[in-house]
Amino acid sequence: QVHVVESGGGLVQPGGSLRLSCAASGTIFNINDMKWYRQAPGKERELVAGITFGGGTNYADSVKGRFTISRDNAKNTVYLQMNNLKPEDTAVYYCNAYYRWNNYWGQGTQVTVSS
């Protein structure tokens, strides 16, 4: 069983920055892909960014150049550095860990971008 916990959300003004963290715990050996998703009110959950165990990354077009995903494999932790935040980035951000053919989700962390 893998337990996933996100942290780092909050309220920030447009143009500001936040750094989200996601820690996976349990009996784990080399988590494959780790991803960040987000879901805004009234919208479907969408992929924001993903990173493989080897460090390969992919991003949604809407966040390219502003968000950076990284991971610390020794700590089973993934980060999402979010810069130049916009009101449309407001959403609940969820971490996903894919391990041994199962998807594990965190409870989500709220990010609100507003003046």
Image (cartoon, grey):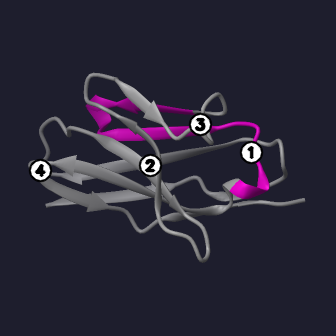
The residue at the point 61 percent across, 63 percent down is 91
Where is residue 60? Give x, y as percent. 52, 41
Residue pointed to by mark 1:
85
Q: Earlier in the sequence, mark 2 or mark 3?
A: 2
- Marks 3 and 1: in contact by CB < 8 Å? no
- In the rendered structure, the answer to whether residue 112 lies left or right of residue 41 reads right
The residue at the point 58 percent across, 52 percent down is 8
- Marks 4 and 3: in contact by CB < 8 Å? no
Part of the protein shown in magenta: 68-88
Residue pointed to by mark 3:
81
In reply to whether residue 28 is colored magenta, the answer given is no
In reply to whether residue 87 is colored magenta, the answer given is yes
What's the amino acid at mark 1? Leu
Disc marking residue 36 = 2
Check disc 3: other Cα within 10 Å, few if <14, some if 14-19, many if 20+: some
Q: Nearer the viewer, mark 1 or mark 3?
A: 1
Dot 1: element: loop
Q: Residue furthest bottom?
A: 42
Q: CA distance from mark 3 to mark 4?
A: 27 Å
Q: CA distance from mark 1 to mark 3?
A: 10 Å
Q: CA distance from mark 2 to mark 1?
A: 16 Å
Residue pointed to by mark 4:
27
Dot 2: element: strand
Q: CA distance from mark 2 to mark 3?
A: 11 Å
Q: Earlier in the sequence, mark 3 or mark 4?
A: 4
Q: Earlier in the sequence, mark 1 or mark 4?
A: 4
